[in-house]
Amino acid sequence: MQRNHSDSSKETKNCRWYSFIDTWGPISLTILLYTGFRHFLAEARYIPSGSMLPGLQVNDRLIVEKLSMRKRSPFRGEIVVFNSPYSFDKKLIAARQKQLPSKFQCSLITFPLISWIPTLSDRACDAYIKRVVAVGGDRLLINGKGEIVLNGRLINESYVEYFCPSNPGFNFCRSLTTTVPKGHVFVLGDNRANSWDSRFWPAGGFLPEEEIIGKAIWRFWPISRLGKPD
């Protein structure tokens, strides 16, 4: 029985469609699953600077858990990852020379492989990692060394080794007294002598809770220091 040209054309189109699905279906599904998991549950992050020394070192790889931060406010002492101050600090935004990128644009810019293209980077899409030292309603005093007096009580921070040097006439660390507003937290790097944190953000230094991406729960690299970050 002879097949007509129409049947042959349909089979060719079907073969092409199945071939496309076989090739790109698994890739597309993997990307969708990865994006969904990354957005709602957890993601991997690396430490780009020494602001959290000595506990977290440059190029440490961490798992950042996101689900719990959607249901509660952060606790004092937790290490959190949050959106760049360039995305929410009003004075930093006012100094921009181009429009603030959307969350969708930032998700593309920070997607693996794409994030390695330097011309696409935007400081507003970066993420920072610091430690929560005060929450909404807390009265906070930070002295020139970077030591904390919280609600009238000096806090013993065993995880801090690098306080600001006490050089007469010169100290780039900032001392301050403040009260943290509700719905915000105050964050510091454990390396008090070398951390751009709430002490220095120009619009006041308070981190809105909604800007927190998640909390660091596990260091998976290097293997020699595998475990929960202090």
Image (cartoon, rainbow, N blue to C red):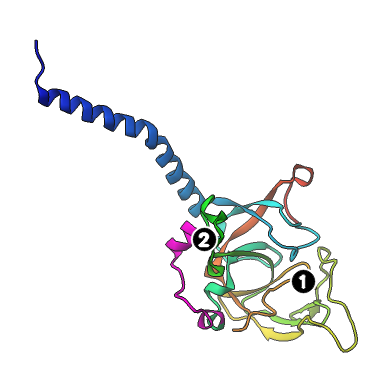
Q: Which residue is mark 2?
A: 70
Q: Quadrant of residue 195?
A: bottom right
Residue 78 visible: yes
**Residue 102 colored in magenta in the image:** yes
Q: Quadrant of residue 128?
A: bottom right
Instruction: Say which quadrant the C terminus sits in.
Output: bottom right
Indicate the position of residue 42 as horizontal and vertical percent values. Answer: 56, 51
**Residue drawn at (52%, 61%) of the image:** 70
* Badge nearest the viewer, 1 or 2: 1
The one nearer the camera, 114 or 25, is: 114
**Residue drawn at (64%, 62%) of the image:** 80
Q: Which residues are magenta?
A: 92-109
Counting residues from the start of the chain, the first of labels 1 and 2 encountered is 2
The one nearer the camera, 35 or 74, is: 35
The one nearer the camera, 26 or 208, is: 26
Amino acid type, label 2 = Arg
The one nearer the camera, 159 or 174, is: 174
Image height of 112 relative to 12, above or below: below
Amino acid type, label 1 = Asn
Image height of 106 relative to 224, above or below: below
**Residue drawn at (78%, 68%) of the image:** 191
**Residue drawn at (9%, 13%) of the image:** 2
**Residue 161 colored in magenta in the image:** no
Q: Quadrant of residue 184?
A: bottom right
Instruction: Say which quadrant the N terminus sits in.
Output: top left
**Mark count:** 2
Q: Which residue is mark 1?
A: 194
Res 60 label: none
- Residue extending farthest to the bottom is 169
